[in-house]
Image: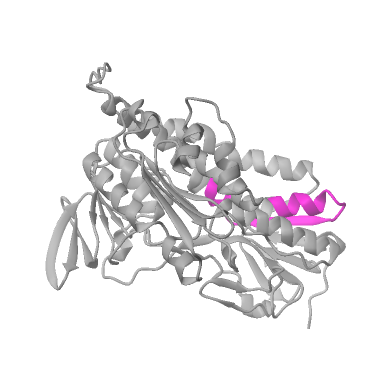
Amino acid sequence: MTKKYEEHEKYDLIVIGAGMAGIAAATKCASQGWRVAIVDSLPYGGTCALRGCDPKKILRRGAEILDAAHLMGDKGIDEGGLSVNWAQLMKHKHGFTDGVPTSMEDDLKAHGVQTLHGTAVFTGPTEVEVSGVGYHAPKILIATGATPAPLDFPGHEHLIDSTAFLNLESLPPRVLFVGGGFVSFEFAHIAARAGSRPIIIDRGPRPLKSFDPDLVDLLIRRGTQAGVDVQSGTSITGVEKVPAGYQVHLEQQGVAAMIEVDLVVHGAGRLPDLSRLDLEAGGVAYGPRGIDVTADLQSVTNSAVYAAGDAADTQGMPLTPVAVVEAKVAASNILKSGNAVPDYAATPTAVFTIPELVRVGALENEARSRGMDIDVRYTDTSRWFSQYRVGETAGAAKILVDRSTDLIVGAHLFGHGYAELVNTISLAMKYGLTARELRSSPAVYPSIASDLGSML
């Protein structure tokens, strides 16, 4: 029998997950007069603001300064024993992250959203329970994000995750990162400049598989110069706790090896965080990539439920801006009983190593596999003024232009400041500017943006 709910337990919309996506949807619907509740078992703010993008970028700033001083060491800048004080840098990070949950919750309340704390568990198609209290709403949005993927080698319980790394009180001298993705590369580049000796272990033949392989090679070479050791084609067979730290047992091309380190960090991917929701009780179908949704983000098996971000199986990349876009589209569809779909066109992404590696649009092999006649405009920018000015010696751009339309179909950049430059390319791609039009547009000189014309 369906539980009968008291009036104060009924809402027009319940949002599960108080990250950037969930908050965006909750405030949007509340602003239209809907009675909305949002719930999370973790502090409000989500992974990006508290345990990912933002705190990582704050720590990267310390690494950037060390790297910048080193690059200019024989060009008039005396490094003078410059070093990272990890504890003070971490305190700087906490100066931002510690206030986020209260700020987020206060803003939600100001919009009229009821804020709940605890784990939401489905008890029916339109019902959830939080800390023993039942709640009902004709519409439910799931935006619970992702969680580290489980690992199966012996000793995996000794690893810390990215959240724990971003809260380390001190940085040990020897750190091993498992997996060749964003997390491992970004953290390893920070650790190397902060005085650690990081190692990245990746079982695949090439790390950062979603980025241009030629530029990934340049990044690995530049990282090696900074002290980042990348070992591809290598599997971890076990991790053992020993008095001096950890022994990590490896296998590379059938040959066994062992490395002793002080810390092992899980950077081997994330999965949708759905296991605690009891989706079966809500009649919500899901798979390894998330909740099964239609193009307009509605559950294929429960019309009352929508999903966005990493919790949803969509074509969108696992990025916070994409999750927010999906959440806003889902909220609009919930409000209007509509069927709008997210626009994923020209979504840029970056690995915030030092320098950064960025991408928007198709990879070269993807464009060719689609039958496109592309002009591959590859440029070595390592000796350009924008690199020379800061003492950098690594940089390259690969821009793919459709010969028949002169439209940019993909852009791949590796270099200082290119995470900002790619936004201009993204806008051009999204709104149909040709390479010729973009090339003819004047830019402030000298600036990194002024490089774009020459790249094209």
Which residue sits furthest front?
A: 404
Q: Residue at x 27, y 43 (%)?
A: 222
| Quarter of the image where one finds residue 139 | bottom right
Q: Residue at x 49, y 45 (%)?
A: 53
Residue 140, percent across and down? 73, 66
Q: How many marks?
A: 0
Looking at the image, residue 359 sits to the left or right of residue 429; the answer is left
| Quarter of the image where one finds residue 170 | top left
- Image position of 370 with respect to 390: above or below: below
Q: Residue at x 25, y 47 (%)?
A: 221
Which residue sits furthest bottom?
A: 1
Residue 293, percent across and down? 66, 73
Question: Which one is in front, 238 or 31?
Answer: 31
- Image position of 348 with respect to 232: above or below: above
| Quarter of the image where one finds residue 77 | top left
Asked if residue 447 shows in the view, the reply is yes
Residue 54, percent across and down? 51, 41
- Image position of 415 with respect to 137: above or below: above
Question: Which one is in front, 46 or 377?
Answer: 377
Q: Which residues are magenta?
A: 24-48
Looking at the image, residue 117 sits to the left or right of residue 422; the answer is right
Asked if residue 18 shows in the view, the reply is no
Looking at the image, residue 92 sits to the left or right of residue 208; the answer is right
Residue 225, percent across and down? 22, 41
Query: Is residue 26 highlighted in magenta?
Result: yes
Quadrant (top left/top right/bottom left/bottom right) for the N terminus:
bottom right
Question: Which one is in front, 253 or 446?
Answer: 446
Question: Which one is in front, 309 or 436?
Answer: 436
Query: Is residue 440 highlighted in magenta?
Result: no
